Amino acid sequence: MAQEQSAGSGQGFAGDSGVSRIRGRVFEWLTLGATVFGLVMVTALLAYVFNDAIRPFSADPLWHLVYATTVVLPALVLLATYYTSDEPAGEVAIASTGIPIVGLVAGSGLVVLFIELLTPADWFGLVVGLVCAAAVVRLHQLTRPNAAVERLFVIVLAPLLAITGIPAMNIQRTFSSPLTTTEIVTIDAATPSLLPSVGDVLRPLLTAVPGWVLLVAAVTLPVATLFGRQVAARRGDGRGVREVVVGSVGLVAVGSLVAPLFGLAPQHWVLLATTAVLPTGVYLEGVVRRRTGVLGVAFPIVLGAGLVLGTALTNAFGLAGPSSWIGWDFLTSPTSITPEDAGIYPPLVGSVLMLVVIITLVFPIGVGAAIYLEEYAPKTGARGRLVELIEINIGNLAGVPSVVYGLLGLGLFVKGIGLDSGIVIVGGLTVGLLILPIVIISAQEAVRAVPDSLRRASYGMGATKWQTTRNVVLPRALPGILTGTILALGRAIGETAPLLMIGAAASVRLAPNGFFDKFSAMPRQIFAWSSEFDPDFRFGVLAAGVVTLLLVLLLMNGTAILIRNRYQRSD
Amino acid sequence: MSNEPAKLQLTGGEQRRVVRERLYRHLLLLCASVTVVVTGSIIFALAFDAVQFFEMVDPVDFFTGTTWITDRGQFGVLPLVTGTLLVTVVAGLVAIPVGVLAAIYLSEYASARARSVLKPALEILAGIPTVVYGYLALIYLTPFLRTLGIDLGTFNVLSASVMVGVMIIPMVSSLSEDAMSAVPASLREGGFTLGATKFQVSTGIVVPAAISGIFASFILALSRAIGETMVVVMAMGLRPRMFDLSAPLSSLQESGQTMTSAMVQAVTSDVGAASPTYKSMFALGLTLFAITFAMNYLSNWIAERYREEYN
């Protein structure tokens, strides 16, 4: 803390008028120093980490020169141009580069899910089941419009039955008193399978259909419809939906025929194209139509062309790149006792599966709680006091140490419900509870930011509270809610202590294939590597793991910021 | 529901709406009450095993004992408490001055542009996973401090605590800055009118006016430091050590153990679920939960109770 000492000497020349100016200056610099102190320190330490993980200096100097001239220099020149002369183009440049990258990463997450967790037929069955359920609900709405309670049951049961059916159940459990461990009652019951799920009905019919066709139908089509609606709303015409759907399904389908020529499985192409190509296309359509910052589109093109050119040149001249610890092998292989073979694939899959559990658990509950607290909760009287207590309680829960949540997970899910320790669902539930207060607080802020005039207008037109909430408040607050949720998910992906407490494995050789499998997660694996004494582990593999985790976080936070910026601009 | 008016029913529709509205209200209330259930189940899950632990180990021995060697059945929590306090104090020594000064800069001195860059940048610090901070402390900070001539063990209290301090800077700075920004401009202008310099206004008017928020931020940040786990597990070692009053600095150079890392050690060691070591985890967890919950509540109370109301 050299700054503080210099402040002391600054105050040393106490005098009169000139002094206070010096004192003020010194103080200003001191405060600035304090602001950047943590930033500089962490940035410097992270620079070491990146250096150890990527080892840029192990590359041929000419390799650096080639990429500097083909990629870095043009990119910098373009950015400088945008910065000085065409600011909207700069935004477009960042978004049109960021969207495909984020899309590719999200798509890779999906690819991993389809490799480890489900088949295209499973997913197709799930989607068709949900569509059937929606149709049943709609039918109920038309035939019995007044039965609200009945409809709640239909809304809950129809999707459940469509997805799971009534499977055969085999319950065998002994309940014993917790203190004396004497048996109280033993339940041993088995029921036959009564009703197959929609997926089970469809599966035999689908064996002949190639996976990618199912994925086009069950992934590309719904996504394209969503984007199509957005485009149609933006343009204010009726053709948007059809154009986007036909265009994207056609593109993806044609691509799947071509993809094998480039060594990409058609199924994977469908997923990656749907998450990366479609959003980019929709974004670019908007840019071209608005005619602001169209020049920004040049940035990703120049970047991509530079990369291709650089790769071609380095290959042609045989220039060696850095022998980085991070690479395709690192991302796709399990850990190993030899540092050169160690990878992070199983924990990566574990983290992805855990995120799936967290999203399905936390998002609805968190948003529901936020809506209740902001829109419905009474503000006065005894019940108002109660609501105030709930709010204080949420604030306090956000401050409870993560290790205590780990104990909660251990006590509640492992010892209480009797799930196995260290399985995906326990990890997801535990970390989900941990981020629940954070999601609620950020969703509350987003809901609170919706201007009251909109609500009043909606009430003025005779809408009820729920109609107002659903049709006016929620759509308006959604970007803010998404931003907050993504940031909270970033927190979830880095949590380690709860995973230690619920017994997540240090390293697993095989990636988990379901929500009831043992798993490890990225931070858990990093912690396991940190107790290795081999310097190659300590400085190489460990650094690579940390960089992978940080890159995932960076992408998630970047996405959140992208969403927030778009939303703020449209206001 | 845009097609609502088209099939508007004048009779019967009202009843249906009331039922539906009530239904959704209760569903949403259910979501909100999940948080209360979580608090309740934390207390229950921890207390359940903690009670069993205190049947095996005398609470007096637990709270006053000065040795924590679980293998020999010695469960004196004081070494862990002093370890936790040591980390918290050192982290506070780093984070509090730096955080408050940063808050003053961001609220009083920074231009809008600098603020729009520095504020989110500081918040990024809070978003880095703790396991990464632990790794930075263990692999990079300790060797760096050694090159400065400080004699440190591989696992030591100093680098872990400094890292925890850096980690909680954003909590201090962002909450303090919120409190300082909420001080009305008229107060500052009044100060300037009386001939005060910017320095005098910042330290003599803004900081005292925002002091309740600033103190609340200290308590929150320190409660975070008390509950911090991964940094201390990775960089501070696992040897419980009573704080030595005769040589306070040497405690910083050696390894130590906090309550949180004792919990991690208990769960990662292969002890049976019925052993006192395993149960001790829950007693520690309950203590930790009580401390942090009380601190958060206190922080809330200070911010509310001593807030200077303007306008």
Image (cartoon, coloured by chain):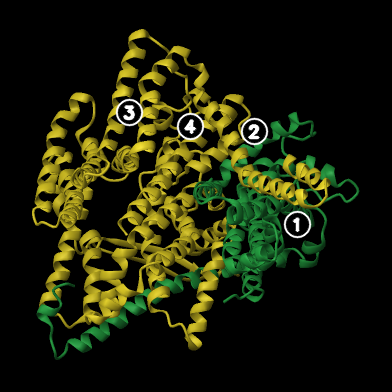
**Amino acid on which disc 2 is placed:** Tyr
- Residues under labels 2 and 4: Cα distance? 23 Å
**Amino acid on which disc 3 is placed:** Leu
Q: Nearer the viewer, mark 1 or mark 4?
A: 1
Which numbered dot is residue B38?
A: none
Chain letter for the residue marked with disc 4 in the picture: A
Crowding at dot 3, Cα within 10 Å, few <14 / some 14-19 / many 20+, comes out as some
- Residues under labels 1 and 4: Cα distance? 37 Å
* Residue B293 can be seen in this image: no
Secondary-structure class at tag 4: loop
Q: Residue at x 69, y 54 (%)?
A: B96
Sooner in the amino-acid sequence: mark 3 or mark 4: 3
Residue that carries the numbered disc 4 in the rendered image? A335
Q: Horizontal and vertical percent for residue A65? A: 43, 16
Residue A326: name its quadrant: top left
Which numbered dot is residue B140?
A: 2
**Amino acid on which disc 4 is placed:** Thr
Chain letter for the residue marked with disc 1 in the picture: B
Placement of B216 over or under A272, stated as above or below: below
Residue that carries the numbered disc 3 in the rendered image? A303
Determine whether, in the image, residue A65 is placed left or right of residue A190: right
Residue that carries the numbered disc 1 in the rendered image? B81
Residue B193: name its quadrant: bottom right
> Which quadrant would the C terminus of chain B be assigned to in this image?
bottom right
Q: Are marks 1 and 3 in contact (CB under 8 Å)?
A: no
Viewer-side residue, A21 vs B155: A21
Q: Colour of chain B?
A: green
Q: Residue furthest right?
A: B246
